Structures are given as structure tokens and as C-alpha cells.
Image (tube, grey):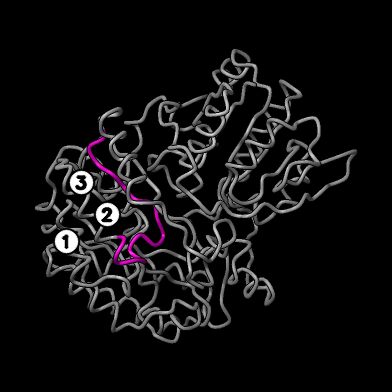
Amino acid sequence: MRVLLINPSQGNVYGVPIPQAYPPLGLLYIGAVLEENKHEVRLIDMDNESTDKDEFKKMFMDFNPDLVGITGTTSTINNALKVAKNIKGMSKVPIVLGGIHATIAPKKTLESEYVDIVAVGEAEDTIRELVENLDDLEKVKGIWFKKEDKIIANEPRGLIHDLDTIPFPARHLLKNPEAYAPPDALHKPVASIMTTRGCFGQCTYCCTKQIFGLKIRARSVENILEEIDRCIQEYGVKEIHFMDDNFVFNKKRVLEFCEELKKRKYDIYFEFANGLRADNVDRDILQALKDIGVVNLGFGVESGNQQILDNIKKGIKKERVVKAFKLAKEFGFQTWGFFMFGLPGETKKTMQDTIDFAIELDPDFAKFLILKPYPGSEVFNQLNEKNLIFNYNYSNYGVYTGPVHRLPDVSADTIQKYQQKANRAFYLRPGKVLQHIKRIKTWDQFKSNFTAATFLFRKLFK
């Protein structure tokens, strides 16, 4: 069977014209499973391949797929539906839509006349079963589908317990792997790797638990190392970015991994795209990460006010955050801090607390973001019940777009003004600009930093 996998335009992920950071890892896993089962697979990454409507039509007609799979997050769901509409104008091929948004809103997604099937949750086992039963969808766990204009919800599919059974992502499906632009990458090409799935955190703004569950499932050290070996030997990868939410949840596993990796003597760099939990790092872990070539460490701080942290169920104390940053700097890591404005319970004072805390922590970089209440999250329900969300156009739910909600004591305009105030207070301090110029070591890093700096200064003086 010929299966076409599509990653729709990712422009809405950021809300601004920033190059796509990483390839669609989820689709690469799906492609690997399909190829393992002897199916022919083609991947179209709309932004990476710069496909216009005519080029897409030619690619589609040349491949003539028997099944189309499209992924979509909340901010890209409208782009995914546009692609589905375009395909239905050319063919009656069945279209399955997966990803986090389809998982949290399967019925709403299927109400689109252009979507035939929704894959809910982890889809590796689901796609394997689906391609074998396209004529008898009732047999397939983990999907919702249409039958005679009715929406049918099949039995849910359980999570994959042994992640080592999943084949490595089919990276050969990528057409332009070096066109991706991971933040602050020192060297290209970069490979993104996920070594765990699931998160025990209860953070009210996060939807991760909806697709990967609350229990952390980890790949074996041997399995991870084999994937790294292949990335280096087959794809010439010079940098690995881990996409885990909880890479350092198990100290013994981290130390074992780092010790085994050191034996390979690879001259490559490692980063953690989603940062680390501040309460999961200690001296032993930081020393081990330093030894394998980790350069940057980021921590999700969110707020500088303890009550706000408690409101969002972050499960961490400010004192622990201070300790994590102090340790990271002591070991010579470049540090990132991630902060949010517009969280439930916010006032002008609590947002000022966040600005003050960011300056106190003084990471090399601080990202000040505005909360996006994604459907499926606890915070969405909290705000929605109080009629505090005023924008339900998910194309406006990008990382760097303006607020889509207000709070009882804070207007949307005030939330945005505090974000701008934070960027100015943090980055326009004497010596900060010079510090960032000095830290640039490679041409790839210069290019990515120039793009980031241009965007930042637009935000500062908008």
C-alpha cells in the first residue's frame, strides 16, 4: 500500500515567520512502522519542501496514495484541514488525521467533511492495524471514523509499554534535513531524539498527558545508543537534541547512559529542546551531562510567584529553581529560563514578580511567553467556564502570538504589555548584548542567533 504522510505548514506554531525548528518526529515514527510492514511511504513536509499548491498537486498525483495521514497540533489544525480539503478536491483517498489536537478533540475533528478517520493517542500500533483493515474499520482500536454520516468511536488503544519495540524514525524520508533550524544549534545537521514518553507532572497548562499518559516509559540505554550510532554513521549528525519532557527523571538511567556514551568518544553536542525539571537535577547529573558535551540547559520556571506556581500545579518551589540555576552556572552551562504571563490568578504584582525573578536568576536567555489555553488542558476548562477566553481561532494559538484570553484582574492588553516589559527589563541591561555576541562560536549559531535577535528586537520595540 502507498501511504502519504503530510506535515502541514508550521507557521502558526510560532505565529511569526521563523524557520521550522525540527522535523515531524511523530510522522517519521509512523513512516518507519509502515516501511517495516512493507508499505511504500512518502513524506511531504509543507514548509521544509516549500510546496505551493501546484507543486503539491504534482507530488500527490505522481505518488497516487491509497491512504493519507496528516498530523496536527492545536495551532496547526486549520492548516491540516486546508491540506485535507485540497486533497479531497483531487481524490477520494481516505484521510486519517492524528496528533495532539485530533486526540483531544476527535469528534470535532471528524465533523470536517474532509477527514475520514481520526487516530487517537500514540499511533504506531494503530497505523499498523489501520492499513490492514481499511475495509473493516470496526476492527481497529484507537480510531474514530465516519460510517454513513455517523461518527463511530472504536475501543481505545492502550499505550505502548515497551518503547524499544518501535523502529527508529525513518529519517531518510526527509528531503532537506539541514533546512531545519533548531534554536541555538552549534552545528548542523541536527537529529531530534525522544528517549521517554509520558509525564508525571500535573501542570494545568499542558496537554502532554492526553497523548502519552502520566506514567513515564523509557527506552533502554542500549536502544538509545543504537539510534545515536545510526544518526552519526548514516546521516552525519553533529548534534543531538533530546525532545523528552522528563529526560532526567531517573538518576541511575541518566548516569548509565552518559557513561556508556562517553565510551564511544563521539565529537558531537547534545541539548534538551524542552528543558529539564529544576527539581530533577543535582551535581552528579550535571557533571555527567557536562562530560558528554551538553552545552545549554533550560528550565521551565513559568512564574516568579509561588502562589501562581501552586495554582498551575507546577509542583516545585522557587528555592529549588534558584538552586538549579546556581548549579548549572557553576558547571559552566549556558542557561535558559522559560516564563509565562497570563496564568490563572495573575495580577500586575505577580507578573512583576516573574520579571524580578528572571533578573534574579539571570539565565543567558529568557523566553517570556503568553499562556495559550489549549483545549484538553485543565487551564482551558478553568478559563472557558468563566468566559475568559475570547478567541477560539486556533491559528492564533502560536507560541509568540498575543493573548487569546483575559483574567478577572488583568486585561489581555496588560498581559501583553508585561511580556514586552519583561523582554526590555531583561535584555536591555548593560552588558547583556555584549555577553551574547561573545558566546557565538560557529556560523550556524550566528545565523540562528541573528534570526532570534531580529525577532526579539521587533518584540522589544513594537
| Label 2 environment density (alpha carbons within 10 Å; few <14, some 14–19, many ≥20) | some
User: For the residue labelled by badge 1, is the local secondary structure a helix, a strand or a loop?
Assistant: loop
In this view, the mark in front (3 or 2): 2
Q: Position of residue 143 (x, y in %)?
A: 72, 46
Pointer 3: residues within 10 angstroms few (<14), some, or many (20+)?
A: some
Question: Which numbered disc, 1 or 3, marks the residue that appears first in the sequence?
Answer: 3
Residue bearing mark 3? 269
Three-letter amino acid code of the residue under disc 1: Phe
> Magenta residues?
237-253
Question: Dots 3 and 2: beta carbons under 8 Å?
Answer: no
Residue count near mark 1 (Cα–Cα under 10 Å), binned few <14, some 14–19, many ≥20 = many
Q: Nearer the viewer, residue 395 or 38?
A: 38
Q: Position of residue 112 (x, y in %)?
A: 76, 42
- Of the residues shown, which amino acid type is indicated by label 3? Tyr
246 within the magenta span: yes
Mark 3 or 2, nearer chain start:
2
Seen at 78% across and 42% down, the residue is 145
The alpha-carbon separation of the residues under discs 3 and 2 comes to 15 Å
Residue 333 - label = 1
Give the residue number, with chain letter if any, for mark 2: 257
Which of the two discs, 2 and 1, labels the residue nearer the N terminus? 2
